Image (tube, rainbow, N blue to C red):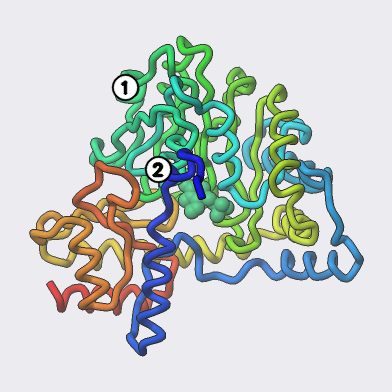
Amino acid sequence: MKIAKSVNRLGTEAVYNIFAKTKELTKQGKEIIDLSLGQSDFKSPKHAVDAAIQALKDGHHGYTLPTGIIECRESVSRKIKNLYKADINPERIVIMPGGKPTMHYAISFFGEPGAEIVYPDPGFPIYESMINFTGAKAVPYNMIKNKDFSINPDEIFSLINEKTRLLILNNPHNPTGSFTEKKVIDKLVDGVKKFSNLVILSDEVYDRLIFDKKEIPTFLNYPHLYDRLIVLNGWSKTYAMTGWRLGWGVWPEKLIEHVFKFCVNSHSCVNAPAQYGAIAALEGPEDHLNQMMKEFNERRKLLVDGLRSLKGIKCSMPGGSFFAFPDVKGTGLSGEKFSKKCLDEAGVAMIPGTAFGKFATDNVRLNFATSRENISKAIEKIDKIL
Ligand SMILES: Cc1ncc(COP(=O)(O)O)c(C=O)c1O
């Protein structure tokens, strides 16, 4: 058997290996506190669950249009208008099986040998994986240079040249939990004016998971970029719906026919009942999200205070998402050794920073979307082994 070289260039997400290992250890009777996952422990909103069940009962279980049922696309458009006052034609919105396929498609559209794609490191691992898959040159910008892990426009500008086709941004940011303020995004938007062929992929999947009463400076508020802007978002994080596999992308009008064809050539359409649940999630009350964020805020403080109390660990306060990204250098261990020791000796699962690129050798990512009890226990256990 001879498989294509490109397949061997695909990367992965370390979280799945750790997930398998924690399952195995739990099966062996070990108590594991899992802070490695990228998902909320909250249940999906009841009104979304009910709507999906009702859709099945009503017989809405056939194929839909590859780009999504029009009611769902219209609902996304209305939500964007309500939240951000931006006018996005539903025809430019594509419903996807998760947030991930939007990045898969966007990188596939622009990546090929000879092209360059600029992306965050540390960053969501699929950016680099997919860039390598296409044969394009992966050009990372360093997200740990700034103390608060915010985006540094000047560094980004220095990496763009005539071969750069796509710039990937992610705010709030996984894995650092950083939030980049509007003035920085304004500077970035201003600076990319001179690179008129550059397309921007803005991954805004954590747009509603922002603390301290701040709001995302969404790229949807820069209409002059619309013909070269792709915005990735979805239901996974905001509505605690990761396993439903529901996301949306806002695309330049001229790319829609290509997205349509990619959908036809891969998944045909998103699970129909799930799309009805998705509409209900968008249209329904937001108590679920408000409650979740209130709780995450408490947990954020609990985790960060706990980490800061440990000898040799420094941790900045995450501004968004549900991740903390402490620097563990002071313990004398690298992020990789530290996370291995925590799992083997303390039964606490987390992810080393190097699972997100090459720069964050001294960091680990911990998820605070788990109970306060788990967080306190995890800190105690880590304290003991240190
Ligand atoms: C930054 C970022 N983008 C996209 C995704 C993908 O989301 P989904 O699970 O909806 O595919 C994730 C998931 O963890 C993420 O952290």
- Identify residue for label 2: 179
- Rendered view: 97 above or below 216: below
Q: Is residue 372 visible?
A: yes
Q: Is residue 172 visible?
A: no
**Residue visible at 77% across and 35% down?**
90
Q: Which amino acid type corresponds to the residue marked 1 in the rendered image?
A: Asp
User: Badge 2: few (under 14), some or many (20 or more) residues near its Cα, within 10 Å?
Assistant: many
As drawn, which residue projects farthest toward the bottom? 29
User: Badge 1: few (under 14), some or many (20 or more) residues near its Cα, within 10 Å?
Assistant: few
**Residue visible at 40% across and 43% down?**
179
Picture quarter containing residue 26?
bottom left
Percent across and percent down for residue 169 are 45, 34
As drawn, which residue projects farthest toward the right? 58
For the image shown, how many numbered marks are present on the structure? 2
**Residue visible at 50% across and 18% down?**
198
User: Which is more toward the observer, 252 or 279?
Assistant: 252
Percent across and percent down for residue 232 are 58, 40
**Residue visible at 37% across and 66% down?**
18
Q: Of circles 1 and 2, which is in front?
A: 1
Q: Quadrant of the C terminus?
A: bottom left
- Identify residue for label 1: 154
Q: Which structural element holds mark 2?
A: loop
As drawn, which residue projects farthest toward the top? 194
Percent across and percent down for residue 362 are 19, 51
Picture quarter containing residue 52?
bottom right
Q: Which structural element holds mark 1?
A: helix
User: Which is more toward the observer, 282 or 325?
Assistant: 325
Q: Which amino acid type corresponds to the residue marked 2 in the rendered image?
A: Phe
- Rendered view: 196 above or below 300: above
Percent across and percent down for residue 11 are 42, 47
- Rendered view: 295 above or below 321: below
Kindly report the distance in space between the C-alpha atoms of the residues bearing marks 1 and 2: 17 Å
